[in-house]
Image: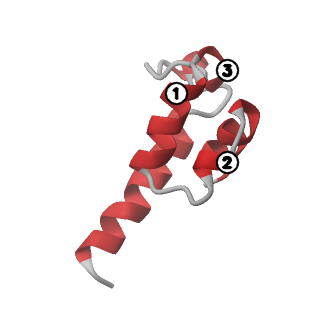
């Protein structure tokens, strides 16, 4: 597996862990996705290369970020 592919997998895993509904309860510093703007969610989705992000509404971006 190429290094860039491994880095991409690790970024996605970190995003899933940091943004679970109870992340703040465990001492995490990430804010809830629901409290972020659609643009902030879009930028995060762009950062981890979620396909179809430009056509997603806020809830779809949240779901994609949590399940990616």
- For disc 2, the marked residue is 55
Q: CA distance from mark 1 to mark 2?
A: 12 Å
Question: Closer to the N terminus: mark 2 or mark 3?
Answer: 3
Locate residue 1, reporting x and y percent. Answer: 33, 85
Comparing 35 with 1, the one in front is: 35
Q: CA distance from mark 2 to mark 3?
A: 18 Å
Q: Name the secondary structure under disc 3.
A: helix
Is 43 placed above or below 46 here?
A: above
Q: Is residue 8 left or right of residue 20?
A: left
Locate residue 55, reporting x and y percent. Answer: 67, 48
Q: Name the secondary structure under disc 1.
A: helix
Q: CA distance from mark 3 to mark 1?
A: 12 Å
Locate residue 52, reporting x and y percent. Answer: 62, 57
Q: Quadrant of residue 43?
A: top left
- For disc 1, the marked residue is 39
Foreground mark, 3 or 1, reads 1
Instruction: For label 2, count other residues whose C-alpha is less than 10 Å away and answer few (under 14), some (14-19) or many (20+).
Output: few
Name the residue at 43% across, 19% down.
29
Q: Name the secondary structure under disc 2.
A: helix
Name the residue at 61% across, 25% down.
33
- For disc 3, the marked residue is 34
Locate residue 14, reporting x and y percent. Answer: 44, 46
């Amino acid at each position: 597996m190429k290094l860039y592919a491994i880095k991409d997998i690790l970024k996605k895993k970190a995003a899933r862990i940091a943004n679970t509904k109870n992340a703040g309860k465990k001492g995490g510093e990430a804010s809830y996705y629901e409290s972020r703007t659609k643009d902030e969610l879009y930028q995060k989705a762009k950062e981890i290369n979620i396909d179809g992000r430009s056509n997603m509404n806020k809830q779809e971006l949240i779901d994609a970020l949590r399940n990616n």
